[in-house]
Image: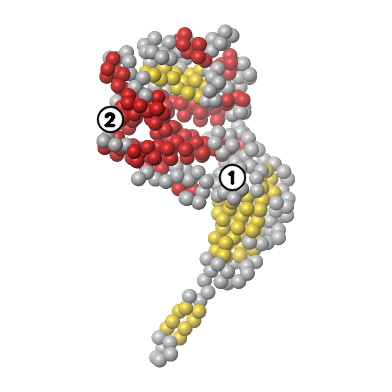
Amino acid sequence: MVLSYPAGAAPIEDKLNIDVVTLEERQESKRRIINEYDKNITFTVKSGGSLGAYAYKWDLNGDGTRDSGAWESGGGAIKTVKYSAAASGAGKVQLLCETANRRKVYNISVALNDQFILSKNIRVALGCYVGTPLGGGTTPQGRDAEIQNTFSWNNTTPIAFDNTGQGYGRAEQEQIQQLYGSSSYTIRTINDNNRIFYALDQSNRIAATLRTGCVRDRKNFGTNRGILVYASYLTNIPWDHNFTREALTVTVEHEAKHCRQFLEAKENNPTNNVYRLLDEHYVPTWGDAGYNNVVLFLESETHLQELNDKNIDFYHYVQGNQELQIFNTKYSDSRDLLDKIQNNPDLKNKAKLFLQNIYNSMPFDEMKKGDYEFNVRPPM
């Protein structure tokens, strides 16, 4: 940059050198919202070079000191380190799998020429769940007892459920037993305040909520048909994948949210809410495929709820249950569907507002930045 000051016929000029420097991190060539455990993260100071070479001093464990160990020594513009259970040393910083570290954030910084400091926060997930161990053992009876003793669901909590015997499809206790029980495992009677239970479901689901029908059925066939919501269930996956009680609770709250979504659609309260409009638009015309479209919108909201829960480990968002990736898929697919809604302006406007509220409520700023993995765009 050249600065000039008029001074008669010969202006006075001076040249000012300006350099733009930034600090960037990558793991496996990707910028990650939450970095994974025991994998190299490379930090790079990017410079235009107009001021020549710098001397670099790094703080890679966030303790506020520089060159304090082998993991920080050897000052260059690029440093690579992994966070793991191994003792701190060259190329590694110790991060123990302890409850205090379940949502670990490091303030990484580098000093240039002992003057200018670049810094940024990074998140690092642990390599496992930490927290309260999940009880229930290996038997369906034990796991069902753990559910029953942990969660206070009944006929009116978290919603006023429908009774079996009122509908069709999966509505009967006998059918629920056939689908999710066995000769040695009897499903508790749903109507006797047993609205969440353990299911022998081999579909690779973690949990699900049992509902049948759609709004159009109620219009066509009367009060005994339509949206009916019976109960929710959990499968073997939380136990087989070493969930903690905190992780199981987040999963159950996910299903409780689905119950509330279905209830609003069923009762149309508030009037013409987005759940009701989605159900009326997609399900009667498209059948199962239409219901799958509805689910994309509903799952966007429930997976966001999990991402916003500060009681759960970062691990749940990456390796544990891949919440960031799942949310990215559900939300992005819903956003694509929004563009295709035709001849239904009320739904289009409310669905857009629904997705906009989800976008505005995302917990990590990097989710809105295009150079990060699993970023998403606002609805258009």
* Quarter the C terminus occupies: top left
Q: Tell me the SS state at disc 1.
A: loop
Q: Position of residue 11 (x, y in %)?
A: 43, 87
Residue assigned mark 2: 272
Residue projecting furthest to the bottom: 9
CA gap, disc 2 to disc 1?
A: 41 Å
Front residue of 270/216: it is 216
Disc number placed over residue 326 in the picture, else none: none
Q: How many marks?
A: 2
Q: Residues within 10 Å of mark 1 (few under 14, many from 20)?
A: many
Instruction: Please state if 212 lies on the left or on the right of 207 as rendered.
Output: left
Q: To which quarter of the image does residue 157 belong?
A: top left
Front residue of 332/250: it is 332
Front residue of 293/7: it is 293
Q: Position of residue 265 (x, y in %)?
A: 33, 26
Instruction: Please state if 4 lies on the left or on the right of 180 as rendered.
Output: left
Q: What amino acid does circle 1 point to?
A: Asn
Disc number placed over residue 35 in the picture, else none: 1
Q: Does residue 90 lie above or below 45 as drawn?
A: above
Q: Does residue 200 lie above or below 335 as drawn?
A: above
Residue 326 in view in this figure: yes
Q: Residue at x 59, y 45 (%)?
A: 35
Q: What amino acid does circle 2 point to?
A: Asn
Q: Residue at x 56, y 56 (%)?
A: 24
Front residue of 357/344: it is 344
Q: Residue at x 42, y 17 (%)?
A: 230
Q: Residue at x 57, y 8 (%)?
A: 183
